[in-house]
Amino acid sequence: MPSSAAHVAQDGFTVATRTRGFSEITGQVGAIVAASDVRVGIAQVFTLHTSCSLLISENADPSVRGDLERWFARVVPDGDPLFEHDAEGPDDMPAHIRSILTGVSLSVPVHDGKLQLGTWQGIYLWEHRHQPHQRRICVTVLGQA
Amino acid sequence: MPSSAAHVAQDGFTVATRTRGFSEITGQVGAIVAASDVRVGIAQVFTLHTSCSLLISENADPSVRGDLERWFARVVPDGDPLFEHDAEGPDDMPAHIRSILTGVSLSVPVHDGKLQLGTWQGIYLWEHRHQPHQRRICVTVLGQA
Amino acid sequence: MPSSAAHVAQDGFTVATRTRGFSEITGQVGAIVAASDVRVGIAQVFTLHTSCSLLISENADPSVRGDLERWFARVVPDGDPLFEHDAEGPDDMPAHIRSILTGVSLSVPVHDGKLQLGTWQGIYLWEHRHQPHQRRICVTVLGQA
């Protein structure tokens, strides 16, 4: 009864970020999907932090990521006197707001044992702090073989 | 053992958009849920593009969608000289930013074989480009009978 | 065969909000996870409304929540003449926009029978209306024992 052969796989990895910016993680997430027995289902991706985020973005033209940085820097400026929470520096509260606007949790369908992404979609970790960090990612794959 | 009778169903459809704006897809997603054997679980909805998005919005008063367009047009204006990525026109980069702010992936609980939405909640595809597009939606239903 | 013993649990609760602001719900979500038989999987959290939202935020310093309120009040101001949809008052349309920017649906991995959250992560319901409301939350736990 293949329709009731449910599978769950969970694995993780760490991204060492150097400064504010994007790290593509499509390959690492896809490898965890490939290592699972799931052919049809979803892959849920989660980062265990409040000052970075996960997003799906255009993966061809690097100027998209540059424009994203510039737009967010304008809308959520570092060192804004509006912010009371600045113990870790001028990028402390902006990092939390950027994280909330873009999210720490996303899911992608799995089809035929692979991430079902569009041609131009990539999964990115977005570091919002200027200092380097170790960012933990947890991937849970649910579905059937 | 009903508690271990897991089911996964996956199906998709395409929305032909005419211009920037909203298309309600609650009915199409609900039909895929109804056709599955899942009584209790979740429906994960995903669009395979980087210039449209999925969201849950108030579904009664059309002025809500008009106000959403006006607010996003103010905050992420077309043709903003801040943007370097404009190969496809003045709405190219704004479409990517709107897509990231509102997301391409969402999940809704399934209860008693139906989408468990609030009275005023509808699922919408939001087209962010002015030109018509064919937008692919993938729905994965996970749960038990 | 533990790998095919799939479990799904679904439960809910209501949060009585008094005014605009944050209610931490990590404990209630964690209790539903603990009451399920799921050891490895995901917990999907959903609120059935269009004028509140769910988010994962820093849970240590209350000034983070104060700064979030101040930033959103600046970017999506109550009573903005841009908005046509104001039948329920000056916070009506801003509540919908805040809800869409932060989302009504999120998922957290479950590991070893517990929510797999980072040290500083808490799950919050964010009420965007000034009047009190009864906010329904639905939690679906999927995975294996």
Image (cartoon, coloured by chain):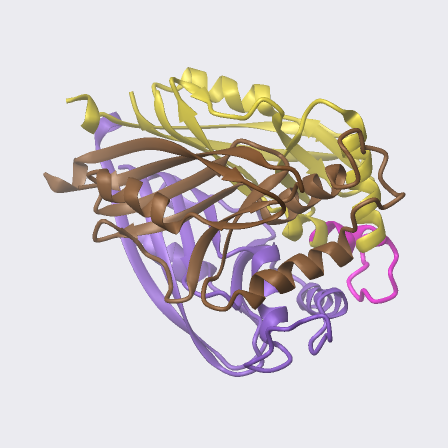
Chain colours: A yellow, B brown, C purple
Report the span colored magenta. A77-96
Q: Is residue C17 left or right of residue A101?
A: left
Q: What residue is drawn where x is 10% and y is 38%?
A: B1
Residue C82 is drawn in which quadrant?
A: bottom right
Query: Is A84 one of the magenta-colored residues?
Result: yes
Residue C100 is drawn in which quadrant?
A: bottom right
Q: What residue is drawn where x is 81% and y is 29%?
A: A63
Main SS, magenta region, reads: loop
Q: Is residue A96 left or right of residue C42?
A: right
Say how many tags the image has. Answer: 0
Residue A29 placement (x, y as % from top left): 53, 24
Kindly tell me whether residue C37 is visible in this rendering.
no
Residue C15 placement (x, y as % from top left): 42, 72
Is C109 placed above or below C125 here? above
Residue A145 placement (x, y as % from top left): 29, 20
Query: Is C61 one of the magenta-colored residues?
Result: no
Q: Is residue A73 left or right of residue C98?
A: right
Point out the image quarter for the C terminus of chain B. Answer: top left
- Identify the residue at the far left of this view: B1
Is A23 placed above or below C114 here? above
Is B30 placed above or below C101 here? above
Q: Nearer the viewer, residue B46 or B51?
A: B51
Is C125 placed above or below C144 here? below
Residue C20 placement (x, y as % from top left): 59, 76
Kindly tell me whether residue C105 is visible in this rendering.
yes
